[in-house]
Amino acid sequence: MLRSYWRIAGILLLIGVACPRSFNAYLNTSAYSFARQNPGDSTLTHVRVYESFMIRGNDVLLKGSRLTISGVFYLDPVNAFDVDPVFNMYNVVYSTVWMQRKLQVHLGRQFIYAVSDVARMDGLKVTYNRKKMSLLGFAGGYVPASGWTSDPINSHFWGMQLGWKATSALDLKAGLSQKAHSRTYGTERSPQEVSPNLRSLLGVQGTFRKSRWTTFVRMRNYTNDFSISDFVIHGNYRGSSQTPLQSLALEYQYRTPRIPENSIFSVFNSSASSEVRLSGRNQLTDRVQGSFSFRHVWFSGESADIVSIGVNHTNFAVNVIRQEGYGGSSNRLVVGIRKPWEKLSLAARTTIGNYRLLEGNWDDLSTVSLTGEYLLTDRLTLRSEVHVLRNPYYTNDTRFQLGLRVRI
């Protein structure tokens, strides 16, 4: 634990020395505990200690550059998990600009949001922007959720993308990428190699805006047989302050399963899913909004419907949610209240309802949470949360979180 704190202190010192002009950082220290007691009076208590940080420095070594670092360290001193302690670096990226900011270079661990695929990598990203055209290229080692890549050659992520602003209302993008994930399962004494999961995708995307309407379309295809990996079409309307209708959105999505990227369950058969979603918000009075959402999901020959209707006020919100279909059935009433003061902000949320799994009977389910946030100084914020859960599996499930955020 102390070693990881020294790592964070070293990073802060390095940025402070290399970045005399502009430097800011956020440190979040928190402890999250939960105690569960089942009907057999067996109690399990965990205390998770977290230290997360985000550091930004401008004009580091070069004018116009930026260094961004973020990560988290956590462990359980009471009932440690097999992987404890954990130190995960989310981002360590150094960026510079050239040619009157037309050329941008990003080096290090970073998230890539390309039209063809999305992933985190350790590598290089280069972006070149013109008035109506942009070019993007990236290459590096693929970083899975565990945050560690032992073989950056077999676990890699690279791609390129072309963007074109056809008109003031129409943006078009096309890109190609390849992601490979090399994995090992089993124990340290008897590891079992699994052939790298490799996928190459071609993505195309278009965004059209006119007045208060926006239409977005994106399709990704596997390059080996040109079958569809995922497809989404989204249309929405944004109202004005003078009209009751504030927003209306309709969306269709088709997704192939992503389990093969991260899990040994890739050896099993899996099915694609499709979804239609309709949602909207309406201004009922000056301080009250009504909202609704309807989702219809298809999966493996089955379907499910989820309907939500709510009323939102400045300081409270009420939502009624109904689900029926392949994932089971549930009825929920969610009530939330928020009350801010000068330096203190309190929020409470209660969920009351029942649910039924496919093979079971109707059971009650209720949760209550209370959150408080207090501004100690301009740079220190104290936050705590209490969460109580009631269901047939635990006679007592109470969770408590206490955190302190420091702004440097």
Image: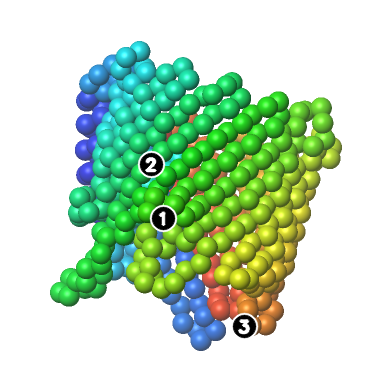
Badge 3 marks a residue whose secondary structure is loop
Badge 2 marks a residue whose secondary structure is strand
Percent x, y of residue 218:
53, 43
Position of the C terminus, as image quadrant, is: top left
Task: Tell me if residue 106 can be seen.
Answer: yes
Residue located at (66% from left, 40% from top)? 235
Q: Earlier in the sequence, mark 3 or mark 1?
A: 1
Task: Tell me if residue 25 can be seen.
Answer: no
Q: Residues within 10 Å of mark 3 (few under 14, many from 20)?
A: few
Q: Residues within 10 Å of mark 1 (few under 14, many from 20)?
A: few
Position above or below: 78 against 204: below
CB atoms at circles 2 and 1 under 8 Å apart? no
- Name the residue type under label 1: Asp
Give me the disc on residue 359.
3
- Name the residue type under label 2: Leu
Q: In terms of depth relative to the viewer, which is nearer, 129 or 347?
A: 129
Q: Earlier in the sequence, mark 3 or mark 2?
A: 2
Residue located at (47% from left, 61% from top)? 257
Give me the disc on residue 225.
1
Residue located at (79% from left, 45% from top)? 290
Q: Residue furthest bottom?
A: 40
Q: In terms of depth relative to the viewer, which is nearer, 198 or 150?
A: 198
- Name the residue type under label 3: Glu
Distance from Cα at disc 3 to Cα at disc 2: 44 Å
Going by the image, does 165 lie left or right of 336?
left
Where is mark 2, residue-wise? 176
Percent x, y of residue 30:
41, 51
